[in-house]
Amino acid sequence: MKKTRLFGIAATAVIAASAVLPTATVFAASAPRVEKTTYEGKGLVDVDFLGDVHYKNAKVTVKDASGKKYTTQITHRDDDDLEFRIQNYQTGKTYTYQISGVGALHSNTYTTVSGKVTIPASSSKKVSVKKVTYEGGGKVEVDFLKDVRYSNAKVTVKDSAGKTYAATILDRDEDSLEFGIKNYQAGKTYRFTISGLRTAGVSTAQSATGSVTIPAKASNISLAKAKSIALTHAKLKASQVVFTEAKPDYDDGVKVYEIEFHRGNWEYSYTIKASNGKILAHEKEYD
């Protein structure tokens, strides 16, 4: 009888101890998706994922339009992007890539994601625009394909009707320039020209052109609504958590809300699209 009683006490203690251990349950992860592909020059391609990922025996295969395969090498990877280099590439061509062994965070399932990248035609002396990003608030960032130097640089901006808008250079370095458009109108596309640029070994100043679309104003959800969406997803109430961050931000020109809160040792983080309340990324960690 004593042995039976002791066994019962021990079993009860084990059950009670297991009840207080933190669970490793996390949110269901969606399949990995490519958010953006950027050609960095010299055969280097950067792939940004929508949300955090992890890898298992990751490999990259690249083909051109005719089906010819090209040797590739992964040069860098982390939880939200992967960079690879295409060997013996040809300029002026578009390539299709596939990255295998990619899994969403908190998932044991790995899959293959794909995308396309165009390598511009070679022009060793001409200044070319690689990427244009609208940063919000009339601010535009222009990345150049090659490093540049400046000589009385100026930016002119026009809309499709030919109307000129005042523009101010806000920042610049050897591979990018940021400018602001004054009195801009949302929902319009603007054509810009940056003059006073030179590449290495060229004394004559050149110009680079491009276009940027400023998104139409949307009836964005409020910050309070974004916090409510995050709490609903986490199945918690405001009275149960402590918010450590709740602020608007921009992700590639798209307005989002960054929400962070914790309950006990659990930390929650959310990125929520302001225009429709869609959860773009979320994470739950035990600290």
Image (tube, rainbow, N blue to C red):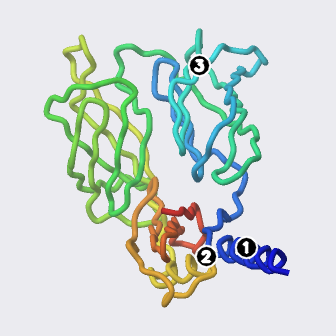
Q: Is residue 210 above or below residue 223?
A: above
192 sits to left or right of 2: left
Q: What amino acid is labelled 3 in the image?
A: Gln
User: What is the C-alpha distance between the residues marked 3 and 2?
Assistant: 39 Å
163 sits to left or right of 226: left
Image coordinates of residue 170 in percent, x first then y, are 21, 49
Q: Residues within 10 Å of mark 1 (few under 14, many from 20)?
A: few
- Mark 2 sits on what residue? 234
111 sits to left or right of 241: right
Question: For residue 37, what is the image quadrant?
Answer: top right
Residue found farthest to the bottom: 239
User: What is the C-alpha distance between the residues marked 1 and 3?
Assistant: 56 Å
Q: Nearer the viewer, residue 218 or 27?
A: 27
**Callout 1: SS:** helix
Question: For residue 90, what is the image quadrant?
Answer: top right
- Mark 1 sits on what residue? 10
